[in-house]
Amino acid sequence: MFRFTALAFEYWTRHAEGVSKPAAPGIRARVRAELTEAIKTTARTHLASEGAPSLSLRAVARELEMASSAIYRYFPSREALLTALIIDAYNTVGACVEEADAGRERDDLEGRWIAIGSAVREWARANPHEYALIYGSPVPGYAAPDDTIVPATRATLVMLQLLADAIAINGAPDDTTEIPEPLRSELAAVESFADGSVPPAVAAIGLAAWAEMLGMISLELFGHLENVVYDRDAFYNHTMRATGARLLR
């Protein structure tokens, strides 16, 4: 169970007992940030033990020994708590991908692609329940708000930049791929998002590569490679190189 610091415990006890003496604004902000993080940390343990559909604010409050009414001052609903966890997960994996890509030379296209894939897989293996929250089955009854869009694009923006750099280095491929409508219009939106540097045919290849990468990770995390592939590292690395050859040609 999470252990409050003395500062947080004193503030929360005063608040729960209705003590009128106010805390200094700086202390209130620090305590609020600390308790917010405590709630999210405890909620992540519940994701692991109960799963996202069963996440309960009251259960989290009980584990933290908070009054159930107090937790609603931090997260007004289960959906708000789920949103906070989703945003944190997207930001964390996005930061891992950005760091991995930044560690490679810009013209090392294959090395950057392998680094991106390795970063996502390593993060997923270390945080399987958070991976499942953002890349697994949707939580019944939950609709992600717009607040999740920017964090969700962090990793994919790195991917788009890789595609743009590949075109800049190797030249734009001939757009001979037959892409039916309305898919072409949707992929044109990706082109606009990438400032026109990633044409629809290349965006389609990039999305397919991203889906293949997540698919391999999901097969591994969710146990679908048991008794099929034993050397998971070799399988993943081989597939990533094969995918990169198609992606970056």
Image (cartoon, helix red, strand yellow):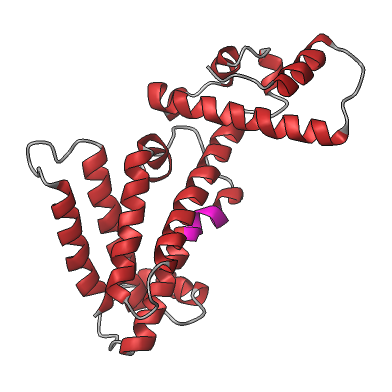
Q: Is residue 236 above or below residue 3?
A: below
Q: Residue furthest top?
A: 17
Relative placement, left or right, of 17 versus 178 is right
Residue 171 appears in the rendering: yes
Q: Position of residue 75 (x, y in %)?
A: 66, 30
Residue 86 sits above or below residue 157 on the image: above
Q: Is residue 121 left or right of residue 195?
A: left
In the image, residue 110 lies at what x, y percent? 27, 72
Q: Quadrant of residue 239?
A: bottom left
The residue located at (81%, 17%) in the rendering is 15
Residue 163 pos. (x, y %): 37, 75
User: Which of 7 and 116 lies nearest the eye of the viewer?
Assistant: 7
Main SS, magenta region, reads helix
Residue lying at the far left of the rendered structure: 227
Q: Tell me: 216 left or right of 10.
A: left
**From this viewpoint, is residue 172 visible?**
no
Residue at image coords 16%, 47%: 232
> Furthest residue to the right?
21
- Residue 2 in percent (x, y) is at 56, 20
Which quadrant of the rendered structure holds the C terminus?
bottom left
Q: Is residue 127 left or right of residue 193?
A: left
Magenta segment includes 43: no
The stretch of residues the image draws in magenta is: 149-154
Identify which residue is drawn at 44% across, 75% down.
Answer: 188
Above or below: residue 128 compared with residue 57: below
Using the rendered view, name the quadrant where residue 27 is placed. Answer: top right
Q: How many marks?
A: 0
Q: Residue at x 21, y 73 (%)?
A: 246
